[in-house]
Amino acid sequence: MILTGNEIQRMRENGSLVIEPFDVRQINPNSYNYRLGPMLGVPKQDQNGKVNFDFIDIPEEGYVLQPQIAYLGHTLETLGSDRYAMSLIGRSSLGRLGLFLQVSANLGHTGSCHQWTLELVSVKPFRIYPRMRIGQISFWLNDGEPLLYKDGYSLHNGPTVSKMLDSLGLDSMKDSVDE
Amino acid sequence: MILSGKKIYDEHAKGRLNISPFNIDHLTTNSYDLTLGSKFIRYLDEIIDPTKINRYEEFEVGAEGIYLNKGDFLLAHSVEVVGSNHFVPIIHARSSIARLGLFVHVTADLIDIGSHGNVTFQLFSCLPVRIYPGMRIGQVSFWKPKGEIDLYSGKYQGSIGPRVSECHRDFTIRGS
């Protein structure tokens, strides 16, 4: 079952989930609108084809994403729950403009609580602004005792690059991710 | 919990969810197949800016269909009016469509409880593909909510045909 907006507010008040900072105007009938944090990871390919991310502060006048490139942003809010599973997706107002938020991995594990890394991919050049309401998070009941996720990416705030190479143990390739 | 196809049929019969027109042949095990309508929208500006009204053109497509190049982005709509005051709808592509490299939404698959209207599809193609009005392109599933329900009364309520983004309208709180 998915929590209604009222239930999200109620469960936040009793500490079953975290949304910080919180603004009641960002509650929807069955989700909460989160905002874009100030930092953005911009991918750069070096001469050997390796991808690194440069982290910049998104200017107040906005920053234009180039189409069909994956940038790493983050939620302004700390979001999480030890009780519910979460789904982080885009807003329909931005989907209608062709902005993908998250690239097919929208599931937030029970036990995670941090600023979430957002994968941003636009279909056309797209101007983003710091603190804009960019996506929505919904909360889902677990059936069964949750094994709390307290590892890996859940320890990080701000945009965090993929740790896939670490997990593969490919030390020789490690310098191809931004460390 | 997700409704089964049989449950979608029962709840539709009771008037607790709205799919109109309703065709029993469109029921699947866990969803209902949605049909592509004939109206489309294409944005015209080079750079999309969510704080502004982005220029667009609306056009109608006949039985010949429309050819999407790789990387094309169009708004389209479901023939059906979809909504529920009791369940949360979620939109998906049909897997047969996804296998053609076509997205039918751009990461916003969740529909607010209490929202009723034609679904706006956000079509993004990763391969060249021709699509036809009347084809079954998407599916809608229905999920049970927990907690007291406030019904949607937002800016896309009662949509007929595809609806462009109204994002610029909510930018007043950007700096807050």
Image: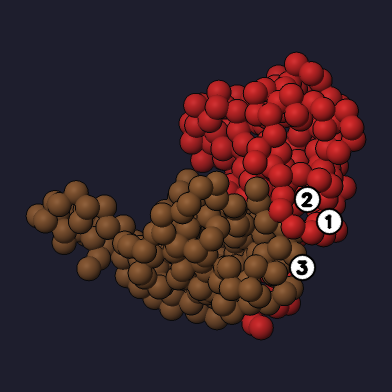
Query: For the residues marked 3 and 1, what is the alpha-carbon distance in whole angstroms?
Result: 20 Å
Q: If you read the primary sequence from the N terminus, does the residue marked by circle 3 or circle 1 appear first?
A: 1
Residues flagged by tags 2 and 1 on a common chain = yes
Q: If you read the primary sequence from the N terminus, does the residue marked by circle 2 or circle 3 appear first?
A: 2
Amino acid type assigned to the residue bearing label 1 in the image: Leu
Residues at circles 2 and 1 in contact by the CB criterion of under 8 Å: yes
Which residue position is annotated with label 3? Answer: B169
Amino acid type assigned to the residue bearing label 3 in the image: Arg
Image coords of residue B78 (percent x, y): 76, 34
Residue in the foreground of this view, choosing between B174 and A115: A115
Query: For the residues marked 2 and 3, what is the alpha-carbon distance in whole angstroms?
Result: 21 Å
Q: Is residue A48 above or below residue A6?
A: above
Q: Residues within 10 Å of mark 2 (few under 14, many from 20)?
A: many
Q: Chain of mark 3?
A: B
Image coords of residue B131 (percent x, y): 64, 25
Residues flagged by tags 3 and 1 on a common chain = yes
Q: Is residue B51 above or below residue B62?
A: below
Image coords of residue A56 (percent x, y): 39, 75
Q: Which residue lies most toward the bottom here?
A: B176
Which residue position is annotated with label 2? Answer: B113
User: At x 60% / y 33%, what residue is drawn?
Assistant: B93
Query: For the residues marked 2 and 1, what is the alpha-carbon distance in whole angstroms?
Result: 6 Å
Q: Residues within 10 Å of mark 3 (few under 14, many from 20)?
A: few
Tell me the number on the disc at residue B151: 1
Q: Colour of chain A?
A: brown
User: At x 75% / y 37%, what residue is drawn?
Assistant: B77
Q: Is residue A122 above or below residue B65?
A: below
User: At x 49% / y 26%, what residue is drawn?
Assistant: B99
Amino acid type assigned to the residue bearing label 2 in the image: Ile
Q: Is residue B108 visible?
A: yes
Horizontally, residue B126 falls left or right of residue B80, namely left
Q: Is residue A64 visible?
A: no
